[in-house]
Amino acid sequence: MMLLDADIHQRWADDKAIVQYLPERYKDDGIVAPELLYRNPGGFLKQDEVSEGGGKPGSDTQKIVEDHLDKHDIDYGMFTGNSWFNLGALPNRDYANELARAYNEWLIDECLSVDERFLGSMYIAPKAPKKGAELIREYGSHPQIRQVMLPGGAEVPYGRPQYWPLYEAAEEMNLAIAIHPFSEGHGTSNPPTGAGHPNSYIEWHTLLGTYYMGQLTSMVTEGVFVEYPDLRLALIEGGYGWLPHFMWRLDKNWKGLRSQVPWLEKKPSHYIRKNVWFASQPIEEPEEPEQHNQILDMMHADEILIFASDYPHWDGDDPMWGLPPMEDEMERAVMYENAMELWDLPADPTDLN
């Protein structure tokens, strides 16, 4: 069985790795980005993944090859980058855009070149959507770059037309759009919950799914997938147990309120099942195993769930043990078939073009 990992966090060992690609006017500034305000008491990284030179886990790309790809026989691994690189929370749009460009140069030169099995999530600055679209067209032709990363936190929801140049460019370049937790409640982003800023990490982490609900509702009801019917969206590290009741509620409201969204000729869940994929990490853990299988059935996981390890975070999921037992057909879909469709991948990485 093939195996694809949708969420591998690689990072640079030293800020100079990114700063070297910045234009002269920003090199003295280096990397200035708001960090996560909520601290996990256990930290975030697996300390047994520290490189021989003492580098932080994820900073040695060859170690990722040996300790993750080779160890678990992973056919493709998607780089999603450094979780504190909060480009969406910076007030200076031009600086954020240049940081995104620098990251993309580093990604191609220092990461994707290490192994043909690696795939890349290129970065853009959401507050500069027209410049972001230019970056997508500039870097999106690289055969290993398969998606565009957006932070979960934003000033306004992603369904707004101001972001549509990004979707137009992604659809044109046959790239997925991915949303991953970054910047929620940091810098210029809005509070990470509808109730405001939480007090602790346990609140922040528990409620990440609610941020995704807001972004997904916006993109569906504003008509993003009507305007760009071939756009593919991945929601990474926001859970998935909330999806069944979310689709039911949205469909029910559409039946009575469709006059507000006349462009949605089909019920909202149709667009979610056709255009949106959900990463498995963090795994839902109900009291009884059969309850998890019910979640999978209710969310149509055989169509839209993809495996993610969240490597090298200590609370990530091992490819062998992360997911509970599933029927063979469901397992094939989750472990590789759905991701192959999401990223439009050949069976053999050497065939990437």
Image (cartoon, grey):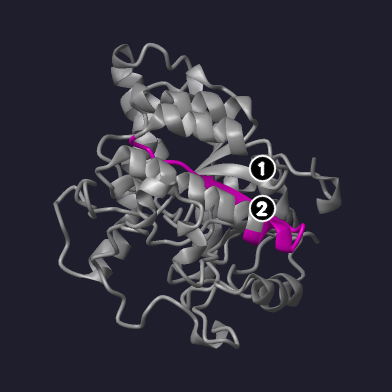
Residue 124 part of the magenta-drawn span: yes
The mark found on residue 203 in the picture is: none
As shown in the figure, which amino acid type bears the numbered disc 1? Trp
Instruction: Indicate the position of residue 18 as horizontal and vertical percent values.
Output: 48, 58
- Picture quadrant of residue 115: bottom right
Relative vertical location of residue 316 with respect to residue 6 in this rendering, above or below: below
**Left or right: where does residue 124 sit relative to residue 162?**
right
- Residue occupying image coordinates x 42% and y 26%: 130
Residue 216 appears anywhere in the view: yes
Front position in the image: 255 or 342? 342
The mark found on residue 343 in the picture is: 1
- Residue occupying image coordinates x 30% and y 81%: 41
- Picture quadrant of residue 208: bottom left
Q: Are marks 1 and 2 in contact (CB under 8 Å)?
A: yes
* Disc 1 from disc 2: Cα separation: 9 Å
- Residue occupying image coordinates x 80% and y 40%: 353
**Left or right: where does residue 2 sit relative to residue 167?**
right
Instruction: State the SS at label 2.
Output: strand
**Which label lies toward us, 1 or 2?**
2
Q: Which badge, 1 or 2, comes first in the chain's sequence? A: 2
Residue under pointer 2: 119
Instruction: Indicate the position of residue 245 as horizontal and vertical percent values.
Output: 38, 44
Front position in the image: 343 or 16? 16
Residue 63 part of the magenta-drawn span: no
As shown in the figure, which amino acid type bears the numbered disc 2? Leu
**Left or right: where does residue 7 sit relative to residue 265?**
right
Where does the magenta region start and end?
Answer: 110-127
Instruction: Indicate the position of residue 39 as horizontal and vertical percent values.
Output: 27, 73
> Which quarter of the rendered picture does the N terminus lie within?
bottom right
